[in-house]
Image (cartoon, rainbow, N blue to C red):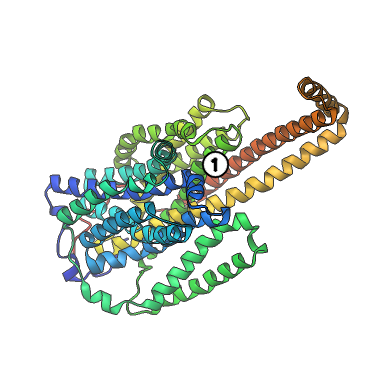
Amino acid sequence: MSTSLPAPAAADAIAPADLPNARKFLIFAVMAFGQFMALLDIQIVAASLNEVQAGLSAGPDEISWVQTGYLMAELVMIPFSAFLAQALSTRVLFALSAGLFTLSSALCGLAWDIDSMVAFRVVQGFVGGAMIPTVFATGFALFTGKQRAMIPAILGMVAVLAPTLGPTVGGWLTEVAGWRWIFYINILPGIAVTVLSYSLIRVDRPNLPMLKRIDYSHLAAMAVFLGCLQYVLEEGPRHDWFEDEGIVMAAWFSLVAFGLFLERSFRSKGPIVRLSPFRNRNFVFACVFNLVIGFGLYSSTYLIPVFLGRVRGYNSLDIGTTVFVTGIAQLFGTVLVARLSQRVDARHMITVGLLLFAASLWLTSQLTAQWGFAALLAPQALRGFAIMMCIVPSVNMALSGFAMTELRYASGLFNLMRNLGGALGIAIVNTWLGDHSRIHAARFGESLGEAGRHAGGFIAALAARVGEYTPDPAQALLIAQGEMAKVIARQSLTLAFNDVFRLMAWIFLAALIMVPLCRSSLAPAPPNADAH
């Protein structure tokens, strides 16, 4: 059932699907590369935060704002971009977004202290966030039939490949050229995307009078709601959640702002976000699926590097080469999944995708402290293919059946759910990891207490070995006890990772309950998404 709203003639008089094929593919390629650049930047910077912290002489609490500020601002822009695309046109918005993203990247590289860096990162996140949902909406407006079937596969691959490549690229750049180049690397590609997007994109016309009717209270409510929510999710695990006064205040601000946001969404004459896509049942379920997918995608992409760094002692380059397997699997799966989406009901595809993703997480829950590239190869490859089986049908379910104007709002809301799922997932798995690690460490302590003679004998033997190099017996005993503590900590953390991966697998299995509630759908939908 379509829930499309009447579109202003001035804004959507152009029919994007009628453009020549070569031009459509060129427009889409430029926009997809812009999206890739924005998504890659998040992970590149995350992989090099320690070097940025040292370079700016920042404290541990201060450096976290380099990522938190970016993500808060990006989260606000993603749903707001639909309004701006309608008011300014896709061409102006995307070119402006790419240009300002490039400029703010250069300013981040020139940052002289932590305050300037955070300020420039907030600007970078806000302006860059517009590129992500805009390319989804434009891709569905440009293509129909079999061509459209490739759009969610390609954009899904971009969305997943960027986090996979990020640690490798960030680690290599920092090691070879210094941390400032993780920002300078965006300048030349950013200029190219800006110039090409402004020259090529002609898919709609602006509706500038909309800017005079903007509801600033709606915008402010959305900014406070999403910004404070992102802050709570990002900083909560570090500050013991609601034991911290700042987290409690941010949560209350977010809750109150959410109420005002809903009130303005339904009663404002010029809302900046339209919630009308939620009238479509398949869109609602697709958004919930995307929340779960974001949870699994970002959490697993986060956990594996943390395991390799904290348990195996890998550096960022070693981690990047190990997790790269997931990206290769996505590349191979893209074409196959796109073809399947033309012949197989989206409900059946997402069922298989969720099952395979759960299986990959379950396989990963067998971790030992010795796991490396070879042991992680099969689970990561399976997860790379499974995520494509999840993303493609969920995108088709969400965006098929909307005309251009409402398609923008649907794309913004849909992409917002994936980002929220990722933020929620990383916050939850961090909490799980800490809690379960402490539980396993306590159990190790209990076991060693019950079988103390074995533990004592091991420590005594180790102290004797250390005593060969250290003449002081007391010092040798302290070293031996320290080594024993490290072994217990490493094993406790490994078992905690296994618990977390198992819990994530159950979440994906639980999501299967929603599949029978969706309407039957053979992915690529209507004849022309731009009919007026």
Q: Which residue is drawn at the image coordinates 58% and 40% (left, top)?
A: 501
Q: Is residue 456 above or below residue 69?
A: above
Q: Nearer the viewer, residue 428 or 468?
A: 468
Q: Residue 320: percent from the left, percent from the top?
A: 45, 35
Q: Quadrant of the C terminus?
A: bottom left
Q: Residue 513: percent from the left, percent from the top?
A: 52, 49
Q: Residue furthest front?
A: 471
Q: Nearer the viewer, residue 356 or 127?
A: 127
Q: Quadrant of the N terminus?
A: bottom left
Q: Residue 64: percent from the left, percent from the top?
A: 52, 54
Q: Nearer the viewer, residue 305 or 346?
A: 305
On the question of residue 24 being in view, the answer is yes
Q: Which residue is drawn at the image coordinates 51% and 42% (left, top)?
A: 300
Q: Nearer the viewer, residue 467 or 276?
A: 467
As drawn, is 473 to the left or to the right of 338?
A: right
Residue 164, quarter of picture: top left
On the question of residue 401 being in view, the answer is no
* Residue that numbered label 1 is attached to: 303
